[in-house]
Image (spheres, rainbow, N blue to C red):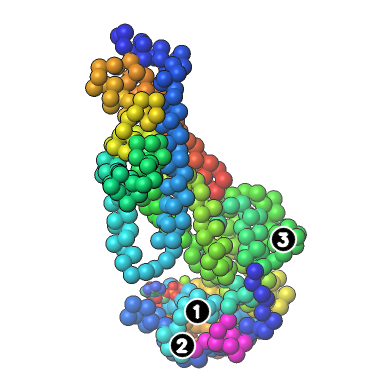
């Protein structure tokens, strides 16, 4: 298995090209998760704690958007950012920033939907006690987010996992330009089709490692939740 | 930051109160007064409306008919009232932090909180478990913590919803002793129970509920010695009210 051997060699010797790709992937997906959290956690909390007309359809759509196909998210962002699109003058298409935008679109519904569920469940549980303690709306939200922090962290990890593993959205808006917008997933897709298996397999190994790491972190968050809050 | 109201919540008056939920009358034609003296015990079988009455008196439930007044006012934020629910929910933090949270919510200054936390935990005998996650405490310990958390609000009126149900005799005695102590301090206690013995031990006044109506109410001594209503007689005789 010379290919696997050279793949491992690439990983273990810290091949610069491979690590540049890994680095960009992480930067893009972590940024996207950060922005998605910035939007998704408040949005999810808001939907969880307010009653308005059309709330249930909104929740159904939000839950459905958790399964938004990455290529569709990519296409939507592409249309916005392309030269003739409404934001075309910003010149973002085929840049890492465009990839961050596309993954933010992809991950926000995941974080918002999971946050909505988590905060709403906790609110049902806490409602009587907090109401009896005459807790105002602001402290209420702070309490719920803080007490749900481990579940919310799990939601962020789920979002990050989705971003790190997707290829459809970033390949459309990033263009897979060597040395500029190549990420792990887009490179794997391209190099495999070109027959350059060692790099593809090396990146595959790194990607799997990251996914396992995320799962371990999520597990750790669960355990911490049990330890701190019983 | 909530401002402590100087006006008293007492007496709490129900006049011809009815509560209807999803078409079902849960309380009907309730008229009674909770005034500042010995504990009032709400008794009655399961489903008779004790919990609903306590929640309404706390101001957590809108009434469908009639009205409730607190110290003569129809609207009164629950700044000097506290309730211990039938199934208390512990916040996901330590025992001490649960009390600290209630103190903060009641507007107690940060510097004053720590001594109060210690005082309240000591009162309910949970000092040694201060740093234990509240949800890991036993049933009886959670009941006591919930009681301490309610007292953190420095209430003038304290509603207790079957605080000793499903507790063993020792844990029950611990709760009843605390109830007597806080009542002696001048806090009005309104407590639901379906345990007649407990009602006898604690009550100044009795309200007997059945199917959302008051069967009989009045001083405990008279109630236990010479109940007037037939249903009250059979309830005291240990018959099942159906
Ligand atoms: N939200 C509600 N919706 C419908 N029925 C209710 C609701 N809350 C209480 N009930 C009914 O009202 C009756 C009185 O309940 P409750 O006040 O809990 O009685 P108790 O505390 O004496 O056991 C019960 O028959 C109960 O099923
Ligand atoms: Mg009840």
Both labels 2 and 3 in a single chain: yes
User: Label 3: how many residues lie within 10 Å, few (<14), some (14-19) or many (20+)?
Assistant: few
Q: Which residues are magenta?
A: B67-76
| A151 part of magenta stretch | no
Image point 45% across, 18% down: which residue? Answer: A16
**Where is mark 2, residue-wise?**
B17
Could you tell me which secondary element the residue under label 3 belongs to?
Answer: helix
Q: Position of residue B63 (x, y in %)?
A: 45, 83
Between residues A134 and B43, which one lies in front from this camera angle? A134
Q: Position of residue B118 (x, y in %)?
A: 73, 57
Q: Position of residue A11 (x, y in %)?
A: 42, 17
Image point 52% across, 86% down: which residue? Answer: B68
Earlier residue among tags 2 and 3:
2
User: Label 1: how many residues lie within 10 Å, few (<14), some (14-19) or many (20+)?
Assistant: some
**Where is mark 3, residue-wise?**
B110
Residue A207's mark?
none
**Where is mark 1, residue-wise?**
B56
- Disc 3 sits on a residue from what chain? B
Earlier residue among tags 2 and 1:
2
């Amino acid at each position: 298995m010379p290919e696997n051997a050279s793949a491992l060699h690439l990983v273990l010797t810290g091949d610069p090209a491979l690590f540049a790709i890994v680095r960009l992937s992480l930067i893009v997906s972590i940024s996207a998760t950060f922005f998605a959290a910035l939007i998704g956690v408040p949005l999810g909390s808001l939907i969880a704690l307010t009653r308005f007309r059309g709330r249930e359809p909104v929740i159904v759509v939000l839950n459905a958007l958790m399964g938004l196909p990455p290529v569709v998210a990519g296409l939507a962002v592409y249309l916005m950012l392309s030269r003739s699109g409404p934001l075309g003058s910003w010149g973002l298409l085929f840049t890492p920033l465009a990839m961050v935008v596309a993954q933010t679109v992809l991950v926000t519904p995941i974080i918002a939907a999971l946050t909505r569920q988590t905060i709403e469940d906790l609110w049902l549980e806490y409602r009587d006690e907090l109401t009896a303690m005459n807790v105002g709306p602001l402290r209420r939200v702070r309490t719920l987010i803080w007490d749900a922090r481990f579940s919310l962290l799990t939601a962020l990890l789920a979002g990050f996992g989705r971003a790190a593993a997707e290829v459809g959205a970033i390949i459309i808006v990033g263009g897979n330009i060597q040395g500029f917008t190549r990420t792990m997933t887009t490179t794997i897709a391209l190099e495999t089709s070109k027959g350059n298996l060692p790099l593809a397999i090396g990146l595959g190994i790194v990607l799997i490692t990251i996914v396992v790491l995320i799962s371990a972190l999520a597990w750790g968050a669960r355990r911490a939740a049990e330890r701190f809050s019983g | 930051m909530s401002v402590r109201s100087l006006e008293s919540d007492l007496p709490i008056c129900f006049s011809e109160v009815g509560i209807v939920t999803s078409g079902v009358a849960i309380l009907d034609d309730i008229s009674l007064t909770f005034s500042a003296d010995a504990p009032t015990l709400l008794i009655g079988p399961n489903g008779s409306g004790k919990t609903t009455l306590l929640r309404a008196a706390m101001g957590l439930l809108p009434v469908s008919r009639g009205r409730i007044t607190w110290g003569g006012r129809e609207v009164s934020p629950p700044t000097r009232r506290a309730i211990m629910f039938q199934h208390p929910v512990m916040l996901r933090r330590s025992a001490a932090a649960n009390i600290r949270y209630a103190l903060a919510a009641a507007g107690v200054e940060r510097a004053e909180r720590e001594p109060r936390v210690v005082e309240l935990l000591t009162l309910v005998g949970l000092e040694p478990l201060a740093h234990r996650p509240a949800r890991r405490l036993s049933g009886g310990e959670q009941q006591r913590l919930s009681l301490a958390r309610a007292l953190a609000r420095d209430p003038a009126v304290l509603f207790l919803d079957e605080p000793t149900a499903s507790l063993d005799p020792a844990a029950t005695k611990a709760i009843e002793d605390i109830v007597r102590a806080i009542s002696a301090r001048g806090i009005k206690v309104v407590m639901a129970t379906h345990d007649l013995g407990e009602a006898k031990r604690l009550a100044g006044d009795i309200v007997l509920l059945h199917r959302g109506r008051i069967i009989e109410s009045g001083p405990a001594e008279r109630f236990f010695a010479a109940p007037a209503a037939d249903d009250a007689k059979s309830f005291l005789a240990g018959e099942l009210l159906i």
